[in-house]
Image (cartoon, rainbow, N blue to C red):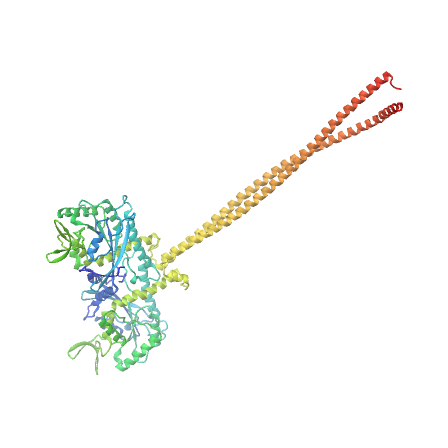
Amino acid sequence: MAATEIARQAGEGARAVPLAGHVGFDSMPDQLVNKSVNHGFCFNILCVGETGLGKSTLMDTLFNTKFEGEPTQHNQPGVQLKSNTYELQESNVRLKLTVVNTVGFGDQINKEDSYKSIVEFIDTQFEAYLQEELKIKRTLHSYHDTRIHACLYFIAPTGHSLKSLDLVTMKKLDSKVNIIPIIAKSDAISKSELTKFKIKITSELVSNGVQIYQFPTDDETVAEINSTMNGHLPFAVVGSTEEVKIGNKMVKARQYPWGTVQVENENHCDFVKLREMLIRVNMEDLREQTHTRHYELYRRCKLEEMGFKDTDPDCKPFSLQETYEAKRNEFMGDLQKKEEEMRQMFVQRVKEKEAELKEAEKELHEKFDRLKKLHQDEKKKLEDKKKSLDDELNGFKQKKTAAELLQSQAQQAGGSTTLKRDKERKNFF
Amino acid sequence: SQGQRNLEGYVGFANLPNQVYRKSVKRGFEFTLMVVGESGLGKSTLINSLFLTDLYSKDYPGPSLRIKKTVQVEQSKVLVKEGGVQLTLTIVDTPGFGDAVDNSNCWQPVINYIDSKCEDFLNAESRVNRRLMPDNRVHCCLYFIAPSGHGLKPLDIEFMKRLHDKVNVIPLIAKADTLTPEECQLFKKQIMKEIQEHKIQIYEFPDIEDDEDSKLIRKIKERMPLAVVGSNVVIEVNGKKVRGRQYPWGVAEVENGEHCDFTVLRNMLIRTHMQDLKDVTNNVHYENYRSRKLAAVTCNGGVDTSKTKNQMTRSPLAQMEEERREHVMKMKKMETEMEQVFEMKVKEKKQKLKDSEAELERRHEQMKKNLEAQYKELEEKKRHHEEEKSNWEAQQRILEQQKLDASKTMEKNKKKGKIF
């Protein structure tokens, strides 16, 4: 499908001319339709609601088929999103239907972050499309669009009011997806309670500024039915895949001891209205709104986040190339600057370290200079001492030599006396 | 994906095509048709005949009547309605094309026009705030070939070669009522031969799924290029009012399939393939333009390397992200390298300092030890000397004492007269 059919002012600057016969371009809508049918359609539904509100059953009932084999495990922490894609066909129309279920929504004690995984999932699909759209070599016409086209929000049939989790979640989702709120398992509410419940819900949504999806009323062919249905929101639904015999027909119903709730009986519930609005009348509009409103918003925010703008300060619109080149130059300049900064930082550190080491070196030398000086002093002292000792030694030597000389002289004299004496003595003997 | 499922009971999405129909009618349609050819080939008449209206009239003269010195590319927009369907038709013509003596590059303004429309669309598509995205891209180019009967002229070949990868080119044999059926057959054969020789890819009215039609389409392909006749005049032939050209020898009827291929052209161009022409323009010609343009910007001239091939599959934003990531890694690496070098140098220097400190310490220690040794030696010497001195002094004292004693004894002995 051509994604280029975004709002266009038809006939701008054109002069109207009459035709003198049948040209044949009134087949254009048929040509377009044939191409779409050949290409196949795709539709993605997100079901948000607490465990046990009959999300899977409703999907089965809506599409008249049993989707999942067995109920999903609810033993993971946090809110998980499980998506399944099915190829359906009705007459010559092929539909690639993706049903995304929130598993574990509302099961936590602290539900503050419950909405986060849902928002993340929706954004991821937008992101994937955006990336494809921005690729240089892209294949948009064969791209499998996974963006969520409709979000069915299941409200628990308390009969009183919306839960705060519901308000918080819907507020976070209303700018990202088309929200269709529905009252689940509404066979638990009586008609009078239901009317009050619907009024309460609608007023709560309005007072909290939650934008739910409005069936479009701009096309005369469907304006009337759509505006009537808008007044029945939120739809109170009952789902069932079991059939019960009523009269001579088998109908989808839920059998109670006190009666049978027929799913397709408009007196019993709004299932038929939901099917009519969601599938038969507005499926294409839901797809279009997703693309032209929700996706565009996401894209705009994402691009602005990355610093892209449409005009420069002089209010001259840029061409893509200029914008891209400017962005790229800015980016490259940024990178170079970072590189420079890092280099400078290192140069600085090196300088500092060098200075530090030089300081240390200087201190070392000073230390050793001091020690050297000390050493010199000590040496000098030693020298002095040595000298004095030497002097003393010399003096002593002299003294000794002198004394010895005297002694030897004396001895010689005395010695000869003694010797004489001894000799004499000897001679006596 | 879970494979085909059979639905039990009517769900209702078979109504989707109706929803699409409804919305498309509300939106209205656009189509831009370009007509190119020398003056006097009946382009304006053909357009008027195709759309059964006076698109070109006295007030809005056709290209051949708007004499230009150089080739111009001009457009006129009309709004037509039929069966509840609104069509904004833009006719682009090229007065002056092929009329000069030297027609070199007369295709350039045409190429420029087509590219500029693609550029406008690209810019509109790339804006942050996208609202109105008018599609003024050229969806089809009717190229008029003069009915020479021989073959294509060099200008024809050149033009088609240059334009076939930018726009859907449908070559037409103009003023076909100057050719007999046999001449026309030969002429068509020759033209197709030359088109194939030059590898020109003209728009070939592809099969649109429908068994009946595809037989028809195959037949039509055998009639290419279509030979057309146009007329603004309604003539009565056998009680029927038809558009035609009155000759003394008869009337060449525009809508008679045996006279020319006008009906084929009209049916193909407007009634069956108008949407396909737009789709091919959008999905093929525009995408080629876009990827060429963006590649030039992101891949630095689009040099065909493996790196470039990789870049082509990414959006420019993702490309920048990738470059940023690469740069961060490069910086990290550079940082660790610088860090390493730095640490190593510091370690070296510190080690050196340590070594020289150790060396100085050692030397100092040695000197100290040396000094201490000398001190010790000195002390030893001193002590020795002291000892010697005191010994000697003691000895001297003893000797003195002895002397004294000896002299005393001698005195005594002398006194005793022991000298004999």
Q: Residue A49's x, y, as percent?
A: 23, 49
* The quadrant where residue B28 appears: bottom left
Q: Nearer the viewer, residue B227 or B391?
A: B391
Q: Position of residue A230 (x, y in %)?
A: 17, 53
Q: Is residue B207 left or right of residue A273?
A: right
Query: In this orientation, does residue A216 appear?
Result: no
Is residue A188 visible to the viewer in this orientation of the structure? Answer: yes
Query: Looking at the picture, how far across and down is residue A154, in whole percent?
Result: 21, 50
Q: How many marks?
A: 0
**Nearer to us in this view, B238 or A132:** A132
Name, please, the residue furthest toward the front.
Answer: A429
Residue A410 located left or right of residue B272: right
Point out the image quarter for the N terminus of chain B. bottom left
Give the vertical position of B164 relative to A42 (above or below): below
Asked where in the image residue A109 lies, by quadrant, the reply is top left
Q: Residue furthest top?
A: B416
**Which quadrant, please, contains the C terminus of chain B?**
top right
With respect to residue A111, does A23 lie above or below?
Answer: below
Q: Position of residue A138 (x, y in %)?
A: 33, 62
User: From the viewer's perspective, is residue A330 above or below residue B379?
Assistant: below
Report the front residue among A312 and B8.
Answer: B8
Q: Residue furthest left?
A: A247
Image quadrant in which you'd find residue A130 = bottom left
Q: Is residue A223 left or right of residue A321?
A: left
